[in-house]
Image (cartoon, rainbow, N blue to C red):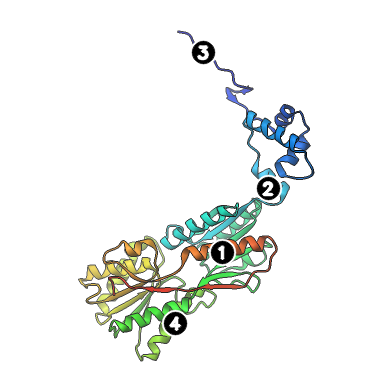
Amino acid sequence: MAITVYNEGKQQGGLKQMPKIEDVAKHAGVSVTTVSRVLNDRGYISQKTRDNVHRAMKELNYQPNEMARALFRRKSNMIGLIVPDVSHPFFSELTYHLEYVADQYGYKLMLCNSNRDVAKEKQYIDMLKKNQADGIIMGSSVLEIDHYLNLELPIVSLDRQLSKDIPVVTSDNVLGGQLAAQHLLDKGCKHPAYVYRGLGGPHHEAMLASGRVQGYGAVLTAADVQSLHVQLTVTEPQEQIVNGELVQFLQEHPEVDGIFASSDVIAAEVIQACYQCGKSVPDDLCVIGYDDVKMASLITPRLSTIRQPIREMATHMIELLVQHIAGEIVPHETMLPVYLIERETT
């Protein structure tokens, strides 16, 4: 049997060595400094020399070290995104739109899933600094936020007031709560309840999402209607615990005839709990969610909800951060409108 051996370039331990910047310089007939200047677009280099360097890179299949280039240019074209739970449909859809818009501006997104862990967030921030991230989009839901305040990095915050120097993008949460409450009243609900998880309640003013319950409460107070508030457990495994909590709540409060959930995910859990309790939606109990993620129109019955303009929020966050990185003055708060979407659960 004949064995054919192909010898492609230098070998070390049976593996082909990757070309180095010195190899590109030799192949193009220029200095290493010239190749570096071409790579980083620094200093005057003739077009002929640039073409020779790029031709040499292509012929050698040379891949520049992006980290080294970032350190040299002090610009990585990378944006860090810190979210509490990327598996949550809202953050999943938001991340999709953020990545798309960032790419239009020449930036790549580094996703950091904090799982609502302060220590993990701090580790991610250290990593982003070491990797020369140009800026950070912060979607944190933890209470401790000191690690964001002295970063000396451009930051744009989602739905949270960090400081007067950090711009925030939000939607009109107060209006969202008002629309939800009025819709339940219009449907004849006399004993509504507000269901939320974690920091969605009324006692964390820095979290702008708390405006939902404020707007909701104001409309019900004006109508002389009282509401129950239900805070769900955040611990794992979430689904089993939450179902049990909601089933128990519905059994203990059979008079409840309408629920405003602080997210579409919670609204879906409410519908499941109603099914377990033998309650019909919307005949026995109306349900309205918040966000209008894709699942809202896919579950049965289809979910009435308050629509946040997720794509527009993502666009504004990237645009503000790009302007912030460039040293431009940006508005402190950008608030976008929300809309009532009526479907089958009301």
Residue at (55%, 58%) from the top-left corner? 81
Q: Identify residue for label 2.
A: 70
Assess disc 3: are there few (<14), some (14-19) or many (≥20) residues with their C-alpha within 10 Å of its C-alpha: few
- Looking at the rendered structure, which numbered label has been put on residue 4? 3
> Are circles 3 and 2 on residues that touch, CB within 8 Å?
no
Spatial CA distance of label 3 from label 2 is 42 Å
Q: Is residue 341 above or below residue 191?
A: above
What amino acid type is highlighted by mark number 2? Ala
Spatial CA distance of label 4 from label 1 is 25 Å
First in sequence: mark 3 vs mark 2:
3
User: Which x, y percent locates residue 136?
Assistant: 60, 60
Spatial CA distance of label 1 from label 2 is 23 Å
Spatial CA distance of label 1 from label 3 is 57 Å
Is 345 on the left-hand or right-hand side of 321? Answer: left
Assess disc 2: are there few (<14), some (14-19) or many (≥20) residues with their C-alpha within 10 Å of its C-alpha: some
- Looking at the rendered structure, which numbered label has been put on residue 166? none
Q: Identify residue for label 4.
A: 215
User: Which x, y percent locates residue 189?
Assistant: 29, 83
Local SS, label 2: helix
Local SS, label 4: helix
Look at the image and tell me whether residue 112 can be seen: no
Residue at (57%, 67%) from the top-left corner? 157
Q: Identify residue for label 1.
A: 317
What amino acid type is highlighted by mark number 1? Met
First in sequence: mark 1 vs mark 2:
2
| Foreground tag (4 vs 1) | 1
